[in-house]
Image (tube, grey):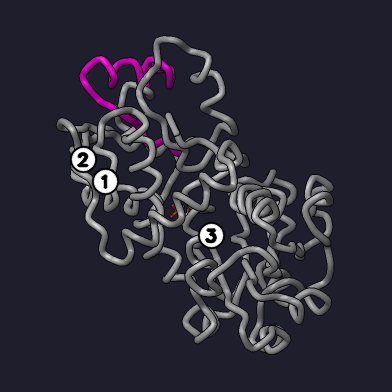
Amino acid sequence: WNNCLDLADLSAAQLQEVLDLAQDYQAGKKAPALKRPVYGVNLFFENSTRTKSSFQMAEKKLGIDLIEVNPATSSVQKGETLSDTLRTLEAIGVDFAVIRHGQTGWYEELMENPYVTLGLFNAGDGAGVHPSQTLLDLLTIENEFGRIDGLKVGIIGDLAHSRVAKSDAKILKSLGATLYFGGPESWYSRDFDDLGTFGTLAEILPELDVVMMLRVQLERFDEANRDAFTAVDYYQKFGLTKKRAKLLPKQSIIMHPAPVNRNVEIASELVDGDKSRIFTQMGNGVFARMAMMTKVLQARGLMEVDK
Ligand code: CP
């Protein structure tokens, strides 16, 4: 827990412990006291609404002081490297950084750099993983069903570019969920073969306890594929329409990491419908992030540990 970069680094017991803590926070548990003033910085090199504001909310609830640095107006624009940016912030007294970066595995070199010792949280790395999203997804599922083991979860859409899909699939499988994948077959990666079964929406929807629809990440497409994409065609072939949603079992819930392209990945009415947990996921994100930050701050001796 010295950093939080990839939930795959954690054991099943550690995952359950952090989920339990997130649920305790959600039930009103007070955060342990900080041992001294703690300073954090949120560096978002890619756009974000949910993850950035949710980390900020979690930090405020834990009593952390935030230092404002915007990569778009920082000396990164003059060519300063990420490691020198972090060394600079550490030198002025910052204890940890939350980082979203377009480079997959942005943290790997930093882990080898003896001069960068502040805490690091991965708020999404390129097409890598998105650990805090995965934790809030686990929390949402566990709150709903009381378990993850034995549930059937479908992940549908832009599997080629989604760090949420990669992150969630690996961890859900490790916790005993049965996985299904859907969407355009050309966007499906054989890397998912070990984790679950690919099928058409008509085949997989009737099986599911949880359907996770993914955003089409046009910003990560090459020009030819971006030009070839049409939202109307995609929605007709792979969108969760109201008609297709009727195939879902009664107990099932609909999730989406958001931002949602309404009427592209999912019918707008379903986003706001009874089965949707999309805005519940966002609320859960604050408690999931409080819990993961607590673990790292405690591991670093910056926060009291409950007796
Ligand atoms: N789900 C998610 O990562 O949303 P943002 O890009 O708005 O942070």
Q: Is residue 209 left or right of residue 118?
A: right
Q: Is residue 45 above or below residue 240?
A: above
Q: Amino acid at mark 2?
A: Ile
Image coordinates for residue 194, horizontal then vertical, percent: 82, 49
The segment highlighted magenta reads: 77-100
Q: Residue at x 53, y 28 (%)?
A: 106
Q: Quadrant of residue 63?
A: top left
Residue 276 badge: none
Distance from the alpha carbon under mark 1 to that under mark 3: 21 Å
Q: Quadrant of the N terminus?
A: top left
Distance from the alpha carbon under mark 2 to that under mark 3: 25 Å
Q: Would you name the residue on which mark 3 appears?
A: 138
Mark nearest the camera among 1 and 3 is 3
Q: Nearer the viewer, residue 202 or 293?
A: 293
Q: Are marks 1 and 2 in contact (CB under 8 Å)?
A: yes
Q: Would you name the residue on which mark 2 appears?
A: 64
Disc 3 crowd, CA 10 A, few/some/many (<14, 14-19, 20+) = many
Q: Secondary structure at mark 3?
A: helix
Image coordinates for residue 133, horizontal then vertical, percent: 50, 53
Q: Amino acid at mark 1?
A: Glu
Q: Quadrant of the C terminus?
A: top left
Mark found first going from the N terminus, 1 or 2: 1
Q: Nearer the viewer, residue 230 or 241?
A: 241
